[in-house]
Amino acid sequence: MKISVIVPVYNVENYLEKCLNSLVNQNLQEIEILVINDGSTDNSQKIIEFFQSKFPQKIKTFAKENGGLSDARNFGIDRATGEFLAFVDSDDYVSATMMEEMYGLAKKHEAEIVICNLQKVDENGIVTQKLTQIPNLPEKIDLEKHFSVFSDISYFACNKIFKRELFEGKRFQKGMHFEDIELIPKILLQCKTLAKTDAFHYQYLERSNSISKSHTERGLDILKAVKNVEIAFENSEYSHKKTELKNFQILEGVYTFLAYLAFVKEDEVYQKMSSELKKFIKERKISTFEILKYQRFGKNYLLSLPLKKQVYYLLYFFGLEKVIRKVI
């Protein structure tokens, strides 16, 4: 089996058919689709059973008690037999050529991870945002030569395929929000060669009731994730590349965290989270100047953002949080 596609399912009856259709119609035939029903209470199971009966050679179905996204993914990893693993969220969908092209690139370049571009779509399938990944690097990426990728890429699990052996002794952390930021960098640190395609194979659905729309104290998991990656980094063969580690801390620990913090409504929670961020920055001796001059894909990150976001970040970095809370 070339690729095992792991699809955790939880109450997605309105989206699941489109997701599974995109997988059973892959050009690459040698795939298995592991559909894990993580305790759904809607009609998701009926949809799963329909597809399994129609495509018994491709789809393997499992039902378990609800344990969350990480737990369902881990359940799938434990049962996967493919040379590579892919993760597709059950409200998203992919192009028919995704697995074929990415597997081909993996074999062509002996790559342990292959990355594609992704785009956000609304419930009508209209593209709302294109998320280009590592635009400034060649198709084959030697990590030793191009280690900037460590701090530049977005750590989604869903727009990548991974050599299955990379997950030996490693799993998504159960009960943790931002589990991708915690695990995928650690997986990458085991690699020597990546590959990429510029195709926008992955369609990421933004829906109004998504888990990512509720902003609470759980956002502190971003900082926990970064701290766990720091430990793995120090124990990796790339531990001497301190600049890239600092850039990772700035992108994920500062900018990603602040982007989340902007939507926290309760003042008490906001103040607690802001205090933790300031502590995080101080402990790592990250200066405001370093944050402002941080570059991603060879360009100044702050200046690449929309004006509204630039103003928000600048107000925060220069201690004008009271202004932010009045404006937001």
Image: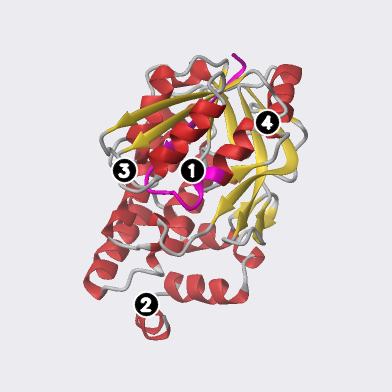
Q: Secondary structure beneath disc 1? A: loop
Picture coordinates of residue 146 (x, y %)? Answer: 68, 33
Residue 90 - label: 1
Q: Which amino acid type corresponds to the residue marked 2 in the rendered image?
A: Glu
Kindly identify the residue that appears in the image at 33 percent across and 30 percent down: 63
Near mark 3 (Cα within 10 A), the count class, few <14, some 14-19 or many ≥20, is: many
Q: Which residue is mark 4?
A: 26
Q: Which of the two labelled residues, at mark 2 and mark 4, occupies the earlier sequence position?
A: 4
Tell me if label 1 and label 2 are in contact, CB under 8 Å: no
Near mark 1 (Cα within 10 A), the count class, few <14, some 14-19 or many ≥20, is: many
Q: Secondary structure beneath disc 4? A: loop
Tell me if label 3 and label 2 are in contact, CB under 8 Å: no
Depth-wise, is mark 3 or mark 1 nearer the camera? 1
Which quarter of the rendered picture does the C terminus lie within? bottom left
Q: Which of the two labelled residues, at mark 3 and mark 1, occupies the earlier sequence position?
A: 1
Q: Which amino acid type corresponds to the residue marked 3 in the rendered image?
A: Met
Q: Which amino acid type corresponds to the residue marked 1 in the rendered image?
A: Ser
Residue 176 - label: 3
Q: How is the image coloured?
A: secondary structure
Residue 161 - label: none
Q: Secondary structure beneath disc 2? A: helix
Q: Which residue is mark 2?
A: 321
* Real-space CA distance between mark 1 and mark 2, rounded to the nearest whole angstrom: 38 Å
Which quarter of the rendered picture does the N terminus lie within? top right
Picture coordinates of residue 288 (x, y %)? Answer: 48, 63
In the image, the segment drawn in magenta is 1-17
Front one among 36 and 157: 36
Tell me if label 4 and label 1 are in contact, CB under 8 Å: no
